[in-house]
Each structure stands twice: as structure tokens, then as C-alpha cells.
Amino acid sequence: MFFLSKPSNDVIKTVIASQKDKPYTYLDIGSSENEQMPKGYNIDHNRIELGKGKEVFEKAKKAITSWKMYNMPWVEVHMENPSIEKGKTYAAVVSTFGIWSINVCRIVYTIDEKSTKNTKFGFALGTLPLHAESGEERFSIEWNHLDDRVYYDILAFSKPNYLIVKLGQPVCRMLQKKFAQESKQAVLNFCKQP
């Protein structure tokens, strides 16, 4: 959903509410969980090392639960309650080139795994009809116990959901890459804070 000026909070809430019972815009729901990427989509996988040890993992986990991976001047996250729960609907409000868009998603699954090899935390979102793209994106933190390194990982598959987005695909791809880079930096910066 596109706007020529920033939509009000009331408009954003109304848009989110209108999508709560809508189906996902793609068939391969949950595919990012096992990294089984469906054909016909753009695949993006971005990863950054955040540091080492439990303290870094806990800070990175806090970054995810407080949505710091969206901490960039051109993106805002809107939801009723900022918790990470399967089925929770939220919107990313994006400003690019003077145009605003509301992109509504739902959390498909959450990750909270512990083993002798690693500990993982995160979630994946799936797109709803009022999203510029169609697909899934996973945000996760992994603490590798073998070398003590902590990573932030973004895995996504997507394709345009509207004709206007398809026509502007080079710009959309550029924005997706920009988002991944800034998201990695936002989480890294959060983890480096005292």
C-alpha cells in the first residue's frame, strides 16, 4: 500500500487490522526454517559475526526482541505489542524517494533452540496481501559453542507482489540489499554498546 506522505498511526493500525485474517501471499510457508528455498524467488542470505560468547548472544537476542534490526531512518515497525510470537501481525512502514509504503507481515514461526553445538534464537515473517513483496524472511542469532562466535543471519526469498513493484524491480532489489546491510549494522552497533 503506497502513499505520497507519511501515513498516520490510525491509518497504519487500520491497515494492520485489515490483514490479521488474510492468507499469506505465497505457498511455501515455513520454507526458510529448513533453508529449503522455493524456485522462482530472489534468494538473499546475509550474515555477520557479532563477537564471541554468551554476553554477545544475549545482547543480540535483545536486539531481536526489541526489533533493533529495523533501526534505520527510512523504516519503522508498527504493531500492537512488540513481542515475538507466532501469528503476530505487524507492519514495516518504509520511506523511499518521497513515497511511503505499508508492508504487512505475520510471524510464521519462532526459533529458540539449544544444543551442545549451538544456541539459536529468532523468527521468520511471511508477507500478507498488503506487502510490496511476496515471500518470507528469517532473522536469527546463532551462538556456535565450538568456536564461541555469535552471528546475526538474515535469510529471505521474495518476488514482487504488485505490477508496479515488478516494473521497479531493480530499485526494489537495491532497497532489499540496502536493508540487509543496514540491518546487520544496526544489530552489530547494538551489540557493541556498553
Image: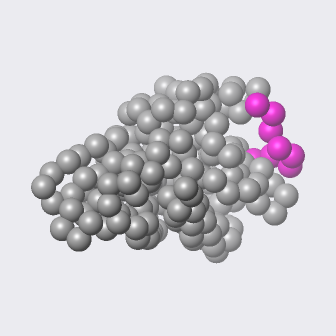
> What stretch of residues is rendered in magenta?
2-9
* Residue visible at 86% across and 49% down in the picture: 4
Looking at this rendering, what residue extends furthest in the left direction?
116
**Magenta segment main secondary structure:** loop
Percent position (x, y) of residue 105?
52, 41
* 144 with respect to 135 (left or right): left
In front of the other: 160 or 50:
50
* Residue visible at 57% across and 66% down in the picture: 185
Percent position (x, y) of residue 61?
41, 48
Name the quarter where the C terminus is drawn: bottom right
Q: Is residue 167 magenta?
A: no
* 78 with respect to 183 (left or right): right
In front of the other: 185 or 1:
185
Percent position (x, y) of residue 192?
53, 62
* 176 with respect to 144 (left or right): right
In front of the other: 129 or 140:
140
